[in-house]
Amino acid sequence: MSYRKVNYEDVDQVSSAMHFLSDPLETEQVGVTVARCDPGWNSKPHDHTDNDHEEVYVLIEGEATVVVDDEPVEMETGDALWIPPESTRQIRNGDAESAFVLVSAPSIGDDEGGDDEWLLSGFAG
């Protein structure tokens, strides 16, 4: 089989909001999480310095605040936020439910040994 499929609602919820999809999808280089945040829910402040993972938070429903290095970033449906590995981040949900897709992967910008660049402007096909 050349693909793997999972419904996030079939994955056990962690920390009362997070559905970690990387294990059931058996990903090797990317982390994917769906966060369904109840009103008033806050994630634990954390960074990814140890694993050098950058993250992109995409808010797909509702409104929320993501605090990056003590700076609140107001998010509304459709907003995407890139966060470098060393920055501390925390989701702070407001009075209504919100939903995020969180994507993480090792940073590629500081790799040694070549001038190769990834095409990040879109998908072919």
Image (cartoon, rainbow, N blue to C red):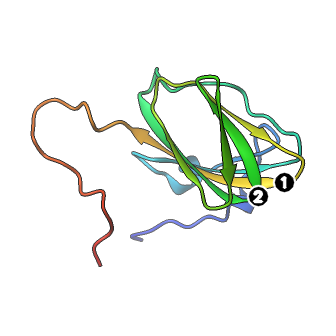
Q: Nearer the viewer, residue 14 or 123?
A: 123
Disc 1 packing (10 Å; few <14; some 14–19; many ≥20): some
Q: Of the residues under marks 2 and 1, which one precedes in the sequence?
A: 2
Residue 119 falls in which quadrant of the image? Answer: bottom left
Q: Nearer the viewer, residue 50 or 72?
A: 72
Which residue is farthest left?
A: 114
User: With respect to residue 64, does 66 lie above or below?
Assistant: above
97 with respect to 77 (left or right): right
Locate residue 26, reporting x and y percent.
Answer: 49, 52
Q: Residue at 41% of width from left, 46% of height from top?
A: 28
Residue identifier under label 2: 62
Locate residue 66, reporting x and y percent.
Answer: 67, 38
Disc 2 packing (10 Å; few <14; some 14–19; many ≥20): some
* Res 52 seen here: yes
Q: Residue at 88% of width from left, 40% of height from top?
A: 40
Residue identifier under label 1: 97
Q: Residue at 42% of width from left, 71% of height from top?
A: 1
Residue contact at pointers 2 and 1, CB within 8 angstroms? yes
Q: Quadrant of the C terminus?
A: bottom left
> SS for tag 1?
loop
Locate residue 72, reporting x and y percent.
Answer: 67, 33
Mark 1 residue type: Glu
Q: Residue at 22% of width from left, 32% of height from top?
A: 111
User: With respect to residue 19, does 72 lie above or below?
Assistant: above
> SS for tag 2?
loop
* Res 12 seen here: no
How far apart in space, not on screen, are marks 2 and 1 (Cα)? 6 Å
